[in-house]
Image (cartoon, rainbow, N blue to C red):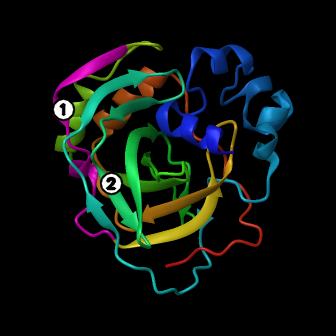
Amino acid sequence: MKKNLLCAAMLLASCSAFAAEQHPHWGYSGDNGPDNWAKLTPEFGACAGKNQTPVNLSGFVKADLKPLKFSYKTGGSQILNNGHTVQVVYDAGSNVVIDGVEYMLKQFHFNAPSENQIKGESFPLEGHFVHADKDGNLAVVTVMFKEGHENAALKDLWAHMPAKEGDKIALSPAFDAAKLFPKNHEYYRFSGSLTTPPCTEGVRWIVLKKPVFVSKAQIDAFRKVMGHDNNRPLQPINAREILE
């Protein structure tokens, strides 16, 4: 499990050429789509688990959620297109403290339309900021983007967005991920999984309540590069609680 979590933190579902060779191709439609992920290989078996992400956040349970403590530095050093998403690799030195545990920011990436929903509302874009603690346990902080005015931080990032799968572009100067966050850090919380194979469970999900704006042109630019929707369908909440 720890190996899968660490791989996901670095490059989503494939952290090495070896992994890419051994794992079957997966995608977002057809025979290799989400409905069949668990059948592609035993290593993807968790995709049929009971605590999967994304979910529709609803039926909230009141809880004493401690404030998030972000300590981010400017560290987005590379942007890449891996065919499943556009991802920014982050240098060491940035973290968030959740319940006294320090999680280091490894990378962040985007999904359009959003994977998670809030009270049944889907958003045109969702950002996942993937963190790992010293033992490889993951925490994903999620930012929702709502269509409106242009997002200045995304404008800088989109200017370097790789158009072709496999392309990587160095970011100079480095990118500051904190610029993509809303000022208000109130959040929902639940236990879930990776939203891509191997769908490993035990991931701590933090969904910020307040969305930030993104323009239609910026949404369209991302969709054009991806060439397809890259959101996994909603999964049952089952016995889980969504805390707020």
Report the amino acid beneath label 2. Answer: Asn
Q: Are marks 2 and 1 in contact (CB under 8 Å)?
A: no
**Quadrant location of the N terminus?**
top right
116 in magenta? no
Coordinates of residue 131 in the picture (x, y in percent)? 44, 49
> How many C-alpha atoms fall within 10 Å of the one at disc 1: few (<14), some, or many (≥20)?
some
- Corner quadrant of residue 107: top left
Residue at 67 percent of width and 46 percent of height: 233
Horizontal side, residue 73 vs residue 94: left or right: left
What residue sits right under mark 1 in the picture? 174
Horizontal side, residue 224 vs residue 238: left or right: left
Q: Is residue 116 visible?
A: yes
> How many C-alpha atoms fall within 10 Å of the one at disc 2: few (<14), some, or many (≥20)?
many
Horizontal side, residue 46 vs residue 127: left or right: right
- Front residue of 105/224: it is 105
Upstream in sequence: badge 2 or badge 1: 2
180 in magenta? yes
Magenta residues, start to end = 168-185
Residue at 66 percent of width and 26 percent of height: 27
Residue at 59 percent of width and 43 percent of height: 5
Horizontal side, residue 240 vs residue 83: left or right: right
Disc 2 from disc 1: Cα separation: 16 Å
Residue 192 sits above or below residue 166 on the image: below
Coordinates of residue 49 in the picture (x, y in percent)? 79, 52
What residue sits right under mark 2 in the picture? 95
Residue 111 sits above or below residue 84 on the image: below
Coordinates of residue 183 in the picture (x, y in percent)? 22, 65
Q: Is residue 148 visible?
A: no
